[in-house]
Amino acid sequence: MTRKRRHSLPLIVGGTLVGFIALMALISIFWTPYSIQDMTGGRLGPLSSHHWLGTDKLGRDLLSRVMIGARIAIAVGFGSVLIGAILGVILGLVAGFAQRWVDESFSAMFDILIAFPTLLLAMLIVAARGASLTSAIIAIGIGMSAIVARLTRLLVKRVLAKDFITASRASGTSWARIIFIHILPNIWTTLIVTFALQFGFAGLTEASLSYLGLGAPPPNASWGSLLQEAQATVLTSPVAAIAPGVLLVCLVIGMNLVADGLRDVADPTLRRSR
Amino acid sequence: MKRSPMIKYILRRLMVLLISLYVASTSLFVLLRMLPGDPANALLTVGATPQQVAAARHTVGSDLPLYEQYFHWLRNLSSFHFGTSLIGNVPVGPEINSRLSVTVPLTLISFFVTITIAVPLGFIAAYKSKTWYGTILNSISQLGIAIPVFWVGVILILIFALRFMIFPAGGFPPTGWSDPGQAVRALVLPVATITLVMSASLTRYVRSATLDVLNSDYLRTSRSLGSSFMEAMWRHGIRNAASPVVSILGMELATTFIGAVVVESVFALPGLGSLLVQAIGQRDYPIIQGILFVSTMAVLVIGFLVDLAQRFIDPRMSKSLAGKNA
Amino acid sequence: MKKSTKRMKLGGIAVAAAVAMSMTLGGTSASAANSNATIDIGTLHEVQNLDNTANGGAGLTEAFTGNVYEGLFKLSDTGKVENLLAKSYKVSNGGLTYTFNLRSNVQFHSGKTMTSADVKYSLQKVTATGSQSPQKSALSIISSIQTPNPSTVVVNLSSKSISLTYNLTYVWIVNSAIGDMTSTEDGTGPYKYTSWTRGATISLTRFDGYWGALAKNKVVVFHEFTDGTALNNALLSHAVDIITSEGNPDALAQFKNASFKITNGLSTNKQLIIFNDKVAPFNKALVRKAATSAIDKAKLLSSIWGDYGTVLSSVMTPIDPGYEDLSSLNPYDVSLAKSELAKAGYPKGLTFTLDTPNDDPHPAAAAFIQSSLAQIGITMKINIITTSQWFDKIYKKRDYTATIQNVLSGRNIGWYANPDFFWQYNNPRVTALVSQSESANSLGAQAQLLKRANKLIVADAASDWLYLYPLIVVSSSSLSGYPVNGINSQFFVYNITKN
């Protein structure tokens, strides 16, 4: 009993962190303390009862901006994981079944995609589509799809090498059925864990994109662009740099813990052995 | 017996490498030209007359039809000539070389320092996972992967460059490596930044790979047969743990090569990444293509080396890879 | 501040002569100055190549003008036109012929002595077919150039040009044997160029064969930064001695101590909203006036620059000939703006898209404009684009409703005289006044004509000129003798000394 509780601890802590941010994002859809266009707060105003986190250069309420940032972080996470998952699993399945040079070409392609950091992809996509939240999500999603594809390929190959596949094939099962009956059920737990991890990292990548000026355009600033803006005023108003930074770290750690927890729950062998 | 499939394998990989390189650079050529934004724009100022706009297009060659540009580029490439920067009018090859003299040391030093730190730490974190310092190690690495890399850079600058003035806050000596002391000093904080972030994630990988091995049946079997823990680990554990770690290492190395751009930006280093950012902004195609060619090659070569290393570590893989059924 | 003010792009049509303005040189004492010192200069301006007729960029102007290359005339730090390689000149033939008497014994860095043939070559380089020089159109009035002897150049004009000498301050005198100068140099300035790493550093060394007083320091290295914070850190850690143009007022707190000096000078860098004057809704002057009156420029300026900078009311800055404060024509007045908008036929407001370049401070300025216009019922969408796209979409195709941009050069009123310019402002009276001003007989008459033209432009609210950037130079306190104003991005380094 105690053992079981200890094992779901990461899930609880992670879930709380992520839940808090998700709640913030949800509230921001209906209500923020100030409108994002309200510039009545005074330049770089201090923390006060009116502005809990102070105001930015243009006199906008920072708490409101941070809340909207939470919404963007969640959107980036979901959007990019969705793109990454769909693209990645399909490509990975294809590569997993491929043989010899087709397989190797796929692998090379994944390697190139993984090594060409999302940053570069984002630069190209932003150059093509203009800087927007969607551009950032697409870039992060495509970058992620290579990681997912690589993993899926490996997992598929591992399953394909098993005897029951050979047996199943021998009994005349179609490949499509094999995918749905044998392969996907055998790999999805690992994939889910990866998606959870990548959800958090997407937020981190978005921050780097915004740091280089490739993120979501104003007035809806992401935490990354808040951090980037705050860097210039870090001496005069450090809270502006701390608040979005801490939330970003919370999101990533939270998702990591969720992923750890999911792994523990999903993989009974690991649970037993620890 | 053993050698011929190996040679065949290497030859095949080489073919794949060349084809990937060609396909990657050609698709890049097309992709880049599809981007909105004429490279001639970097030569324009507000106030330029229509004649000057036309002259700028002529200077950079963007008035030529696409297929002509393509063949021109192909001809250059076949003689390993990357062309001339459209905007700077300097040859791309030497330009990239000078950037590599910053990026390659930055990447490699960070990489080796990371391995030196992260592998033992990851092992300890796994082996001592039930003790308090194992937990602390794990939490620290957890925190480490969650912090944006530019934050780490900014904090290191605040402490070591501005507060204590031990290391420069950024930049690289204009004379490059002719003064190695200065060059190394300039790289200390950037290397530390990359190392901190990369160590955190590598520690976690090593930890989980080691945990997998520690919990494996063969290790337990081996120990029950009387091997000491170290013996068992040496014989079976390292080999099994190393394989996933090596492939992660290869990936991290390749990513850092270009991904150092954020660190280069924080520390104002004249590296490959910052040149690429500038070139993309200006649509300076020859430079973009030159850099991407070099880095694609680096990625593929690293991937190849990783494969070889894995075969060396785990000969079972070579059988499965070289065999018909992968 | 991220990429900051690297960008834009001079290109002044030149109208007029120079008006002096007050200035102080940074620092005064030079007790134990070392004449062999190395001065490290940090800048956010970019060098693209080494040829200013191939748009080498603002960083090149900064590093080379007056330092490596010299013109017949120079624009001083106070904006005055002074003789440089021209010892004297004479105007004849009703203002259509200029005879320049060249300084003798001037050597190029390659050792060759400068002659009138080099001057002719340099002038022709600016007006040649492939030239990207911003002065090309202004100097296209040169109909012929004669070189009667090695020290005399005679320039004939097709029409009178009172600002010829001002325009010549932009023209570098180059050795006629140089050929392609995008990656090499041969000028007459007090420094020789020694090396250039694109995007990183450009190094100069004192030229001992210089015709005038030798430079007061031996080596000057310009360090190019893309990130303002990195540049500040470089100064804080003494990796550079001086920042030519600080982009972030909030970073100044860390320099307010005995180790550093801060000066607040004038630049020619202006921020503006550009309306497409031929496209609805901004084809109506009333709508433009309403938008202009809805924006509190003083608050915008202080949001971005704190206590620095100057609010503008027209294209002219205080050092332009004919400048006057015209803020009463379109005052900040929300109710006036609302009534103008209603009178223009938009009582319920309107919606448009502002194409916004992605470099600082444009996105922040756009957010400010967005919420200002919301007060009068205008819904503004922000479309972020890159500089390259800006040139394609806006400058070349004119496919826009409104945009924002900054312009680095001084004296831009001539752009309004060209109905074909990308903002498509067409007012024949302005065109006539500007062209008359160019053939005026005195600087005073020129200023009067430009004043009248400017008033017409502001009454039409053709564009909304928001503010003039400050030029904040921050240096280590051991440095003195540096320029404190940023006129057309120049930065003369030869008087800088280090204790």
Image (tube, coloured by chain):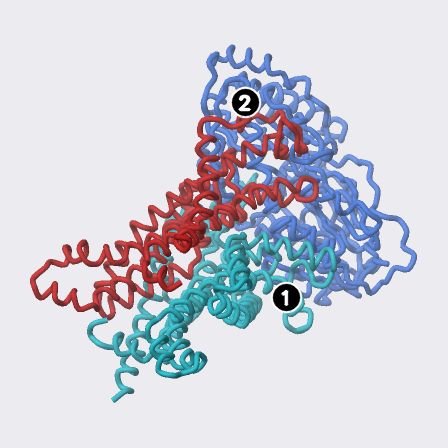
Chain colours: A red, B cyan, C blue
- Amino acid type at circle 2 is Leu
Question: For numbered disc 2, what is the local secondary structure?
Answer: helix
What residue sits right under mark 2 in the picture?
C373
Q: Residue furthest bottom?
A: B1
Looking at the picture, tell me which residue is in the foreground, C306 or B70.
C306
Placement of the C terminus of chain A among the 4 image quadrants = bottom left
- Circle 1: is it few (<14), some (14-19), or many (20+) Cα within 10 Å? some
| Residue C273 rendering spot, x and y as whole percentages | 57, 30
Residue at 65% from the left image edge and 26% from the top image edge: C297
Q: Is residue C337 left or right of C76 when viewed as pictured?
A: left
Q: Is C117 in front, or is C303?
A: C303
Residue A77 vs C204, above or below: the answer is above
- The residue carrying pointer 2 sits among few (fewer than 14), some (14 to 19) or many (20 or more) residues within 10 Å by Cα, namely many
Residue C387 in percent (x, y) is at: 51, 43
* Real-space CA distance between mark 1 and mark 2, rounded to the nearest whole angstrom: 49 Å
* Residue A265 shown left or right of residue A102 in the figure: right
Q: Is residue B263 at all visible to an observer of this figure? A: yes
In the figure, B209 relative to C420: above or below?
below
Q: Does residue C64 appear in the picture of this structure?
A: no
Residue that carries the numbered disc 1 in the rendered image: B188
- Residue C273 lies left or right of residue C100; in this view the side is left
Reply above or below: B38 against B14: above
